[in-house]
Image: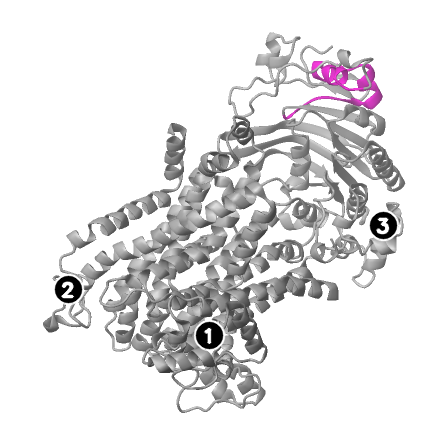
């Protein structure tokens, strides 16, 4: 187990290095004068020159890279032009909101997609199978920002079932005590049921929009994988041994079928982290995606880079987790 | 050629949905080429008297906050959206297929470098990387194309590499080498054309994704600027009016987006069934 | 010999729906297996041997359908049982082992656990007791170091060992009938002999009946009491092993024997059987499906229905013009 964890960590290191190099390139090797970007649109030539020396942009590229690494190690991602605050603390404050939204969407998506895929494979040709195929074909075509808007229109404006998309909580409720930063968990931990429901109601629409987006590839992969496994030799042996259908489907077929699905999770996370930005924009969700989009609009450069770096590091960590999970389920990886 | 067409007709008869996709594709192509000619109004012409009007006989898709005809804007936007998507797919293909084929054929250092490059790109959530690239290169449409191409590069490189690897020892490649062709010639003249069908499937499958990507980027304000007509930016403009009930401004461009992506996904599936049914999931 | 046979297949016909038409894979197949007897089902690839077994076990592919016949086992007709009842019988009263043992086992489940699963399912052991009982089965199939091996995964074991595991799974609940579908294909010759000996000994110990499916006539002769020869979905001859080798009466059986290595003095004498299997989708197949490639063909062969002539002690041949 430990060996598995260490070997996976080892593969993550080149990825982190690559991420750092690319983000450095994105910040320094821009067309035009990087100093002008960081100084802001309205800066005078004098201010630009000051920024240049302050940020060390007059040094050679290798020296800048070393300085960049140094800053990262110290947790310095620069300051936001509009607020003057350090980017790293602004991202830290907003990260829980994005994380809660993404996690909620993922759990919802997995909770629907996997049973749907399994059922569609086991009951091939029935209405469940056709429903699954419709969802997977349509789901990959839906632009997530459009689905979000549609939901907001139908469920908030028309039906008034959902609350106004104004953020994580209704204005009349106050956030729970900060333990994990996740409103759902924190409110439950402090026994604050009113806040829990309030937070859940706000999460519903953006979460469902994101979940629908990631549902399609997961359901498709589950169905396909399950179908392939159900036709394999060892399932025939299991049936010939008279094992109960439930045992055959779950202990034998599903455990094998879930392996490619775990691998697909990596791709799904890539989509989810991107969809995060769009959904936060539509629903004014106060996470790092909205933070980056606002910074883009005002040409505030440092927050955008900090955002890209944070998301990338998060993604590498998530892939590590997925690899590890795969190794837990498949002994051939652990022992082979 | 003829057996391919016959097989195509067989697949189409088995799968009418693919036929539908081809039909839709033709419609979009027509809209892209003839859009500005067919549009009843100019997409840029504002009309202060007719702002925020719901769909009607004169304005099939209604008007927006500046009184512009939404139907005309959606129609004309087809050209911009499809061009951006096509351009990025072709760029991704050129970069990806060439480097992938070289990596698969030569192996060694080429393989490692291309692999490392693709892995590094894939280490990012792709949309986020696209945001970063456009922010770095500048807020222009051309950079949307470049960013989308870069994030699609690893996929093409990987497929091309796998195909080239398989064909490296193939008989016809040996023959080409033995008849005195230099390696570059073999690569460009023999390997590349041979993998074109599979590449075409990849291209149509990623067209849908490229359209979504470009629309997403313009939705958050990158690339296309008002008053240009593009589906993503139109949905963004319409988003402001959803809460006050003017649904048509965002709905029609969004529906066009969905239909276009749906069409290309179906097309890709159909092409794959025609060319190599074994690739089916 | 009036004892009730372990398995009596009567009038079994199976069809497969395919894109290019309906294939009549089996037609009116009938044979019996007595308690404690080993019967070999031999024939070329495509003769329908495995389909017969799959039909009896009820694990035919979804495209396959039993169109007629009965399979009397333990007093009831297996083909008429519901899937639920059949699943009760499978693994407990009748079992099957397959070729390619490595792929026939669950790759991500420990082999001891796979044996335990069958034991628990059919009540051969309680859940807490099952691991120990599984190790006992491993000992029975002569796997060295059984306690450690029980924790292994199939990919860590050799092909021969995996086949022993399959035998352990199949025999865990002491079935009355074992069907072995080419269990030694893919194994080296020494392992083949060891596996066949093992199956023979275990069968003899418990009085279990065995059906042994193979294309290797020599193997069949060495290990089986009786041989049933199949061709294109028909049974063409049934006889005790020695009798078949000494006096084959069906032209096809004779050709099969002549094509068997070991029966001939040199490679040059080994004759291949002319022609190939008929297209089983055709609606106009002659009653005898071998007649197209048979030198002894007469008019009766293509007009009258296939006969079943007794030509000796438990020796039946389906031919109008036997040797």
- Report which residue position mark 3 lands on: C138
Does residue C249 show up magenta in the picture?
yes
Does residue B29 show up magenta in the picture?
no
Which of C181 and B52 lies nearest the eye of the viewer? Answer: B52
| Residue C229 visible here | yes
Left or right of B205? Residue C316 is: right
Marks 3 and 1 on same chain: no
Give the label on residue A143, or none.
none
Q: In the image, which residues are magenta? A: C233-261
Q: Residues within 10 Å of mark 1 (few under 14, many from 20)?
A: some
Residue C51 drawn at (x, y percent): 65, 34
Give the CA distance from mark 2 to mark 1: 58 Å
Q: Residues within 10 Å of mark 3 (few under 14, many from 20)?
A: many
| Residue A142 visible here | no
At a point 44% along the width and 39% down the height, the residue shown is B197
Nearest to the eye among marks 3 and 2: give it.
2
- Report which residue position mark 1 lands on: A57
Give the label on residue B56, or none.
2
Left or right of B77? Residue A33 is: right
Residue B39 drawn at (x, y percent): 16, 56
Instruction: Identify the chain of the residue marked 1, using the numbered disc in the image.
Output: A
Figure quadrant of residue C61: top right
Q: Quadrant of the N terminus of chain C?
A: top right
Q: Quadrant of the C terminus of chain C?
A: top right
Residue B205 drawn at (x, y percent): 42, 50
A132 lies above or below A275:
above
């Amino acid at each position: 187990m430990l060996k598995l964890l260490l070997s996976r960590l080892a593969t993550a290191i080149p990825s982190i290095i690559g991420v750092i190099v690319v983000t450095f390139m994105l910040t320094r090797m821009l067309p035009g004068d990087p100093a002008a970007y960081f100084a802001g649109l309205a800066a005078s030539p004098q201010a630009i020159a000051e920024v240049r020396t302050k940020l060390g942009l007059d040094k050679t590229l290798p020296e800048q890279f070393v300085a960049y690494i140094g800053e990262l190690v110290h947790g310095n991602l620069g300051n936001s032009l509009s607020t003057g605050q350090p980017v790293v603390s602004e991202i830290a404050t907003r990260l829980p909101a994005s994380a809660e939204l993404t996690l909620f969407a993922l759990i919802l998506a997995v909770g629907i997609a996997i049973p749907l895929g399994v059922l569609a494979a086991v009951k091939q040709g029935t209405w469940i199978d056709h429903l699954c195929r419709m969802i997977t074909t349509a789901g990959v075509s839906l632009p997530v920002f459009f689905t979000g808007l549609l939901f907001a229109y139908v469920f908030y404006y028309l039906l008034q079932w959902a609350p106004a998309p104004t953020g994580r909580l209704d204005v009349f409720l106050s956030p729970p005590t900060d333990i994990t930063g996740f409103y759902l968990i924190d409110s439950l931990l402090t026994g604050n049921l009113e806040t829990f429901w309030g937070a859940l109601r706000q999460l519903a629409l953006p979460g469902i929009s994101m979940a629908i987006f990631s549902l399609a590839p997961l359901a498709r992969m589950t169905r396909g994988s399950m179908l392939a496994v159900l036709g394999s030799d060892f399932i025939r042996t299991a049936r010939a041994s008279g094992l109960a259908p439930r045992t055959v489907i779950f202990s034998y077929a599903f455990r094998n079928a879930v392996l490619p699905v775990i691998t697909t999770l990596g791709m799904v996370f890539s989509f989810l982290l991107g969809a995060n930005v769009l959904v936060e924009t539509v629903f004014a969700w106060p996470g790092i995606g909205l933070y980056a989009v606002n910074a883009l609009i005002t040409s505030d450069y440092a927050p955008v880079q900090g955002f890209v770096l944070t998301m990338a590091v998060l993604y590498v960590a998530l892939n590590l987790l997925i690899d590890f999970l795969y190794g837990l389920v498949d002994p051939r990886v652990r022992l082979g | 050629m003829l057996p391919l067409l016959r097989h195509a007709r067989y697949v189409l008869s088995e799968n009418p949905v693919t036929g539908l996709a081809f039909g839709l594709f033709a419609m979009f192509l027509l809209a892209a080429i003839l859009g500005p000619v067919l549009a009843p109004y100019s997409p840029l012409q504002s009309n202060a008297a007719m702002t925020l009007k719901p769909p009607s006989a004169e304005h099939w898709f209604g008007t927006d906050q500046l009184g512009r005809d939404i139907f005309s804007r959606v129609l004309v936007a087809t050209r911009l959206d499809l061009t951006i998507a096509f351009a990025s797919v072709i760029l991704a293909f050129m970069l990806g297929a060439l480097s992938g084929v070289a990596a698969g054929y030569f192996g060694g250092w080429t393989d490692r470098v291309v692999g490392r490059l693709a892995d590094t790109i894939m280490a990012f959530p792709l949309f986020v990387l696209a945001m970063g690239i456009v922010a770095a290169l500048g807020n222009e449409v051309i950079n949307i194309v470049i960013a989308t191409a870069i994030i699609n590069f690893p996929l093409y490189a990987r497929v091309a590499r796998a195909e080239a690897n398989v064909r490296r020892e193939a008989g016809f490649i040996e023959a080409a080498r033995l008849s005195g062709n230099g390696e570059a010639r073999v690569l460009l003249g023999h390997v590349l054309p041979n993998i074109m069908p599979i590449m075409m499937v990849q291209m149509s499958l990623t067209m849908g994704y490229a359209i979504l990507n470009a629309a997403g980027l313009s939705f958050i304000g990158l690339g296309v600027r008002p008053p240009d007509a593009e589906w993503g930016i139109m949905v963004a403009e319409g988003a402001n009016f959803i809460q006050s009930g003017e649904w048509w401004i965002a709905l029609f461009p969004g529906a066009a987006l969905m239909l276009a992506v749906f069409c290309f996904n179906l097309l890709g599936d159909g092409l794959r069934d025609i060319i190599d049914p074994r690739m089916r999931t | 010999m009036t004892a009730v046979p372990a398995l009596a297949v009567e009038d079994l016909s199976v069809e497969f729906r395919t894109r290019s038409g309906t294939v009549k894979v089996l037609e009116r197949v009938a044979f019996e297996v007595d308690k404690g007897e080993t019967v070999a089902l031999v024939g070329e690839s495509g003769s329908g041997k495995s389909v017969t077994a799959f039909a009896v076990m009820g694990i035919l592919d979804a495209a396959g359908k039993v169109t007629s016949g009965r399979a009397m086992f333990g007093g009831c007709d297996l083909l008429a049982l519901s899937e639920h009842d059949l699943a009760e019988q499978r693994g407990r009263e009748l079992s099957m082992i397959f070729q390619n043992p490595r792929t026939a086992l669950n790759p991500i489940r420990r082999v001891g656990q796979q044996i335990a699963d069958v034991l628990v399912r059919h009540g051969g052991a309680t859940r807490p007791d099952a691991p120990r009982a599984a190790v006992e089965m491993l000992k029975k199939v002569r796997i060295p170091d059984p306690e450690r091996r029980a924790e292994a995964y199939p990919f860590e074991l050799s092909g021969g060992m995996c086949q022993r595991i399959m035998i352990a799974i199949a025999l865990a609940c002491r079935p009355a009938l074992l069907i072995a579908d080419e269990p030694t294909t893919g194994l080296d010759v020494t392992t083949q002999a060891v596996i066949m000996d093992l199956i023979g000994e275990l069968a003899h110990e418990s009085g279990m009946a065995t059906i042994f499916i193979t294309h290797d006539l020599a193997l069949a002769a060495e290990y089986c009491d009786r041989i049933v020869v199949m061709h294109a979905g028909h049974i063409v001859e049934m006889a005790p092993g020695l009798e078949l080798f000494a006096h084959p009466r069906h032209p096809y059986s004779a050709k099969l024997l002549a094509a068997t290595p070991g029966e001939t003095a040199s490679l040059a004498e080994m004759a291949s059987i002319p022609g190939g299997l008929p297209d089983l989708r055709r609606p106009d197949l002659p009653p005898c499906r071998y007649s197209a490639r048979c030198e002894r063909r007469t008019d009766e062969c293509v007009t009258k229905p296939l006969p079943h002539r007794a030509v000796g002690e438990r020796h039946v041949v389906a031919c109008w013009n036997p040797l």
